Amino acid sequence: MAPVHFGTLNYAVLAVYLLGMIGVGLFFARKQENTEMFFLGGRKLPWLAVAMSMYASLTSAVTYLGLPGSAYSENISLIIVCIMSPIVAPFILLLFYPLYHRLQVTTSYEYIEQRFGPRARRGVAGLFVLARLGWLGAVVYAPAMAMAVVTGIPLWGCICMMGLLATAYTALGGIAAVVWTDAIQFVILIGGAVWVAVSLTNGVDGGAGAIIQLAGETGRLHIADWKINLFAMSGPVVAFSFFFQLMQDYGTDQVTVQRLMATGSLKKTVKAVAFNACTDFFIIALLLFIGLGLFAFFQDATLPESITPDKMMPFYIIHHLPAGVSGLLITAVFAAAMSSMDSGLNSIATVLINDFKITAHGSRLTDVALARIFTIAIGLFATGVAFYVSTIGSILKAFFSFMGMFGAPVLALFLLGVLTRRGNFAGWTVGLGASIVASLWIQKGTEIHEIYYFPFSFLVAFGTALLASRFFKTELAPVCLTALRDRKNDG
């Protein structure tokens, strides 16, 4: 297939978007009077904007490109996530957020200190930083890969451009800039997905019916196979895996918790979580349909060997849509990526300063200046991690690898705290060690499908911690006991 240049009009569309994001950062930069404003927006941000930001943050380019790629190459088993999201929502609203709002936390790991002590808080905060640095590398790499495919710019140049732009406006405007740019990006990424889906429906003879029929004939709709297969993805396995993964993403992960705490009340948190659950139901199904549409559209085409499933959507956009429109839709890929990177940068900076108690006292810097320095340093490091992610292959596999290794043990400690009285930090450290060894084995020593990485790591960490805790003295912190008693009295 003949190469297609990105074109002046497409570059203009992308440039307007990127300059607009920097403009939002500059607008909010002068309002960052203290770290409460920089990290939480004064706890006065509108719940709908926060909900859009939360969804855009977690719907990264890993999701935006990876889900269509998964449906194109395997099946639509990830459609089960649509169902699991509203199922998990009540659990996180009952288990975690009443405690967070009662304790008025800035990070979720403050609860861990109340329950297990300061060492535990630093431990899980450190794991969060490692998990999200790897995740940031993936969300930088994914759109950079797309840009390299469609523009001919070297991959390293695309990675550097993406990382530096997202870092710039995040460092300028803090969480207010993050939330409002995410709200804009939310509209762009959903609008872009709808446009691609409609275009594919019109571009395939027979429309949506033919797309679904072909998907059925090729086994891409066969998701309810209850036979356990460690080397393939199926609906029941996705349900099991994402029950735990969504609980981690929405219930304990600082990227989400920080936004929901910025609403200022439990009532607004419930609204934001409900909005996300409903949006999940729509957008995941839409992205998977796009993957099926791409499979139908290209079923008889000879594609370049470099076009892997993760690259199918940007390849279609640039080769089969008119100039201007293709620029707008590639911008949607950028929106998906930048909305995740800005949130990750702001959250990691929050954790480093708040949970590791790093302050500007004794220096000429203000706390806000220190927060900005941390944001810039994290952004540069995450950009470097993107080069490593480029060696892993599938962007979904990269995501599952990092989150299984570092995110699953964090969820294990939170649930050990809220569900048990015997669980303790010493027992969890044994579980953590077992989990890391087990994760390295399953990822590097086997061909087991990556969908198993997170639940496997969680079960090893939680089960081992629960058993090991029996051999150590257990003691609940007074504040935690009070919170638990209040929650019981609230019914």
Image (tube, rainbow, N blue to C red):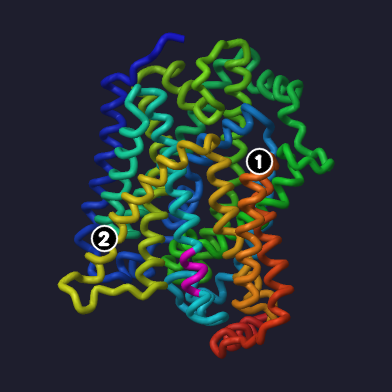
For the record, the magenta segment spans: 121-126
Q: Secondary structure at mark 2?
A: helix
305 up-or-down from 115: above or below: above
In this view, the residue in front, 209 or 123, is: 123
Circle 2 crowding by C-alpha within 10 Å: few under 14, some 14–19, many from 20: many
Residue 48's mark? none
Amino acid type at mark 2: Arg
Among the 4 quarters of the image, the one containing residue 155? top left
Q: Is residue 462 toward the left or the right of residue 270 in the image?
A: right
Amino acid type at mark 1: Leu
In this view, the residue in front, 314 or 488, is: 314
Q: Secondary structure at mark 1?
A: helix
Whether residue 85 is visible here, answered yes or no, is no
| Image coordinates for residue 1, horizontal then vertical, percent | 46, 10
For the point 53% across and 15% down, the residue is 303
| Image coordinates for residue 241, horizontal then vertical, percent | 68, 51
For the point 66% across and 41% down, the residue is 78
For the point 54% across and 27% down, the residue is 197
From the image, tell me which residue sits under label 1.
Answer: 78
From the image, tell me which residue sits under label 2.
Answer: 372
Q: Residue 382 in magenta?
A: no
- Quarter of the image containing the C terminus? bottom right
Query: Which residue is at the far bottom?
Result: 478
For the point 30% across and 38% down, the residue is 161
Q: Earlier in the sequence, mark 2 or mark 1?
A: 1
